Each structure stands twice: as C-alpha cells, then as structure tokens.
Image (cartoon, coloured by chain):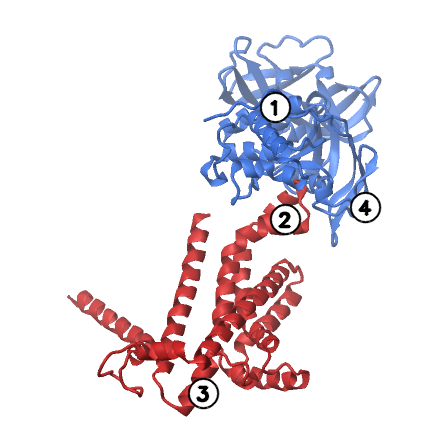
Amino acid sequence: MSARLGRAALWTAGVLVAAWLVAPTLVVIPLGFTDKVSLTFPPTGWSTRWYANFFGDPAWTAALANSLLVGVLVAVVATAIGTAAAFGLTRWTNGRGSAAASVLLLAPMIVPGIILAIGIYAVFLKLGLAGTLVGFVAAHTVLAMPFVVVSVTASLRTFDVRLETAAASLGAGRWATFRQVTLPLIMPGVVSGALFAFVTSFDEVVVSLFIQSPTLVTLPVQMYSSVTRETDPTLAAAATMILVLTTVLVGGGLTLAARRNRAR
Amino acid sequence: MPVDPPEGAALPAGKGARIDLSGMTKRYGGAVAVDDVTLTVEPGEFMTFLGPSGSGKTTTLNMIAGFTDITSGTLRIDDRPVGAVPAHKRDIGVVFQHYALFPHMTVAQNVAFPLRQRRVPRAERDRLVAAALETVQLPGHASRYPRELSGGQQQRVALARAIVFSPRVLLMDEPLGALDRKLREFLQLEIKRIHREVGSTFVFVTHDQEEALVLSDRIAVFNNARIEQVGTARDLYERPATLFVARFLGESTVLRGTATPDGSRSRLDLDGFAVRASGGVRSGPAALVVRPERLRLEADESDAGGGGNAIPVTVVEEIYLGAARKLEVLLPGGARGLVREQAGTSSDLRVGDRARLCWHPDDCVLLPDDPTTERILT
C-alpha cells in the first residue's frame, strides 16, 4: 500500500518537473496560431495568418536565410577544426598539456556569453568584421566548436587505436588511415557534433546582437528586435519553427549516434 | 554461395626476406625492454620468439614492424637498413592477437584494404582477395562483417589480409592467444601449411612452448629483455644453453650442486652423493638438467652398469597419462625428480616404494646455476 503511494508520489513529482521544464517552451506554439494582433494566452481563436506574414515579410525571410547560411557554414568550419582538436587532445601523450589545452578549447562553453560578446565586438570593430558574414561565422564557430570537441572526443575514447596500427602495417599512411579507418568509425560523434554546432549558431542571440548590422540580421536578432518594437505574433510563429527545427536536428542526431553505436 | 576463384588464382608465392637484427635495444626512460638483441632470420624461415610476458619478444616484433622506434642497434631486411622507414612503407604483414579487423568493412573490403593502398587495379584486386580467402579456407564469407564471424574465422580473415599483398615478411603476435585449445591446435597446422604455400619469412611470437615446438624451424627464447638461446626445437630441448631455457621448454629434473671438471666428464657434488655428466664445465655452482624420459627407475639393487648415475629415491607421486605415466621421486637431500615411463615398458613401482634413479651421463646437461630463473618461473 505504502509502496503504491510512494510510486504515485514519485510519478506526480516527475510529471510536475517535466511540465515545469517544457511548458514555457510549448506555450509559444498556440501563441503563433492566434487570430489576434497581440500575444495573448490562451488564444481565443485560431489562424495561420502569422505564418503567412512571416514568409511574406522580407525582413523575416532574409533573417531566416542568413541564419541558415551562417549555421551551415559554422557547422562545417567548427566540425573540421573541432574534430582535429579532439584528435590532437586524445593523442597527446603529455597529460598535463592535454588537460590545459582541453580547458582552453572548452572555455567558450563556460565563459558568460556577454563577456565573449563584448570582447568579440571590440576586436571585430577594429578588424571591420562586425556585421559581415565572415564575422558571424568566426564568432559562432568559437561558441560551437566546444560541442564538436566534446562529442568527437567521446567517440575517439571508444575507438580502438590498434586499428590504426593495423592500417599502418597494411600500407596506409596517416591521412589514408584517418580517412578510411578512423573517420568512418567516429562518424556518429562527428555528425552529432556538426548538428550541435549548427543549432548553437542557429539560436545564438547575445553575440549576434552585438555584431549585427542592418545588412546582416540573423533570425534570433530579428525576433529580439521584433519583441522590443511590437509584440507581433509573427514572433511566436518564428519561435515555433526554430523549436521544431532544433528539436528535430538534435533529437535526430542523438538517436542516429545511439543507433550507430549499438550496431557496432 | 562459394565462388571458385578464377583459373590460376593462387597468391603469388613471394620469396621470403632475410631479417638481421644487430644490437637492437629499446629503452623506455630508465627501463630496458629489449637489451642488445642480435639475431638473423633466414629467408623463408619460420622463427618463433618464445618467452614469458615482459621478456621483450613483442617489443622486438614491434620494432621489426616499425610500430616502435629502435633506441639503438640496426635492423636490416635483405641488407637494407629499415630502422628509419615508417611502418606503412615496410611491406611487412602483421597478424595481431586481437585480430584488428576494420569493423565497418566487410571481409572482402578488409582483405582488399592493403591492395587499395597499393593502387592495385580492381580486377586484379578481386582475384587476389578471392585467392587469399581461398588460402585461409574461408571462401563464401566475403560479404559478411567481422562481427558476424567467430573468433577463429576472424583470425583467418586477419591472416588473409596480411598475406594478400604477398609481403616477404609476416609477423604474428600471439595470433592464437584468444582462441580455445582445440581451435588453436587446428589453426597451428593451418599456419604451418600457409607458411609452406606463401614462402615468406614468418616471425611468430608466443609464450606457449608447445605452440613454438609445433610451428617453428627455429626458436629464439627471450628472457629478461635478452635472447637466451636460438636454435631448433631439438637443440633447445636436448642441449639447453641456460637453466632458464631448460626450465621454460619442457619438463626436467634439476639438481643443484658444486661442479668440478673430471677428465672428459664433469662431476657434480650434491648433498651426500655425486653424479656425473658428459662434457666439461667451469668449477663452481652448477645445475644438472635431465629430461623425464631419459630417467629410469630400477626396483632392484643391481648396479646400473657402465658408469651410469644411480641414486636411491622414494616414489612420492604418480600421474597417469594414458600413453605414459609420470612419477615424482624424492632424492636424498630433499630434491625432487620427475620420471616419465611409456606404457608397456613401465615399472610396477607404486607411491611409497624405494627404487634407484638411473641415467646415462650423456643424457644430461650441466649448466651454470642461475638463481634468477626461480623468480621468473615460480
């Protein structure tokens, strides 16, 4: 009897915590489908006009296109650099040097975003990178790379290094070994690192606010300016689309990695 | 469906290369893993490195393969110094204890891997892969993945992958160590056959003395980072050069005492009695080694005759082995002896009986005593 009561209490607590974590996120979905001109919850009527508005307004579509472009470029650059860094960290035989380098590489995850933003802004102004595509990609890469390093390092930890010795004995040089043996086997880690890198860039707002320019605005920046100027439900429509996209990407990446790992 | 390889698909029989190790040494910080090893492996020879773990045999193999840098000394393959050549340019096949098959490639892709690195054209590649799988008797598994195969099959694939590019040297690092006894014995014969067929120089590392005896043309016995003795199985068994070799390879009775030269023979004084051995020896502490099948037990008090050794003993243990039996006997002074009697010619002595332990001075070896072997072997 008391065991059943205990279990019921546990379930209740679990559901409450889950709701507390997820509910604020889910609220934006009905907000975007409202028929009113303002953000009201709960909505009193339904319509898809705010989605139509989103795709009809060049400010929103340009912001979306910019975010996608920056996100893809960041995913590519951060994955290349982050994979190389993870490789170096796991093969570095000097434990102390490797630990120090790893702290340095992961620092952008820990350092408050606002501090990074001010630093990046100051340097970018000097270099003329503020508001440019290169600037956005460089800044977001700093923030995204730690995710790649973490995920690829985890893959390399379970990788059997002796396979590389075997490949060498069979006539494969270092690069051939990496391409034909190591990379295919750590691919789940690389792919999930790339997805995290894309998502990190796609929803980055603090640094982007600092380095934005009228000609280059990303989606989160556009949303932020929208919420400060007018409380237009288009904002909620945009938020819903970001939510769906990031959830699908991250969830997909994680299940892919899990399945590939199990298969081996 | 097993596909017959095309006509004449046999692997080209590469001629074996000669390997010269000269003063090869490997140091890790202060520790010496391999100490001044000098050895020549003849072309086409089957050489086994035998020794306990940590004796330096695998490190020596890794230096030949190019996986480990040589601290000092030279390594030559067919008179060409290769110490500075990276592993992937040495053209040496290696088979590992842990198989090291690429899990994301099929059997055929695994075996084709060395050929792809050498840019062998597609058709030729397919032909050689089929021939290699035929050689290891594993046709019909080409499209399987390694995880779908048993341990023995995986090791066959690893073997096919190591011979498919006809390397002139094949190194094997305890390749059968992870397999059960029956399969191991079967694969030993297979490896022997493959050695005959491909004609390369084989260097095989093991700590299993029986495996070494079955496979090898010659055996190098490693101990404590050095080679104790190199020779045929017969040399090592019948004429061990050191007490370590005598005790590591096969069973024996070891009697320790003080040696003195005595004409063409030597005399060994033990606790209260003396025995003789053929050949000379330096005066001082020595150990006499006799193999169990060279020892005879006489129940009666009659003389052994011909100046043979005869010591009164008591039988303390009997081990029945079917085709033979082993008797453990207690010598005066507390030493123990081991006698092997073939079924049919065996005495009818039982545990507790008194007898005389006899052997001919030609049938034993007198070696300088080496107390360090106790530490390693017991």
Q: Label 1: chain? A: B
Q: Which residue is mark 2?
A: A177
In screen coordinates, is A196 left or right of B64?
left
Distance between the Cα atoms at labels 2 and 1?
Answer: 29 Å
Q: Label 2: chain? A: A
Q: Label 4: chain? A: B
Distance between the Cα atoms at labels 1 and 3?
Answer: 73 Å
Q: Which residue is mark 3?
A: A225
The reply to whether label 2 and label 4 mark residues of one chain is no
Distance between the Cα atoms at labels 2 and 4?
Answer: 28 Å
Q: Are marks 2 and 4 in contact (CB under 8 Å)?
A: no
Q: Secondary structure at mark 2?
A: helix
In screen coordinates, is A224 left or right of B316?
left
Please tell me whether mark 3 or mark 4 is closer to you in this view.
3
Distance between the Cα atoms at labels 4 and 1?
Answer: 43 Å
Quadrant in the picture for the N terminus of chain B? top left
Q: Label 3: chain? A: A
Whether residue B66 is visible, yes or no, is no
The reply to whether label 2 and label 1 mark residues of one chain is no
Hey, which quadrant is residue A129 in on the image?
Answer: bottom right
Distance between the Cα atoms at labels 3 and 4?
Answer: 70 Å
Towards the viewer: A245 or B275: A245
Amino acid at circle 3: Ser
The reply to whether label 1 and label 3 mark residues of one chain is no
Tell me residue A160's x, y (percent).
56, 49
Q: Residue at x 67, y 9 (%)?
A: B303
- Categorize mark 2 by other alpha carbons within 10 Å: few (<14), some (14-19), many (20+): many
Q: Secondary structure at mark 4?
A: strand
Specify the label residue B72 is tagged with. 4
Please tell me whether mark 4 or mark 1 is closer to you in this view.
1
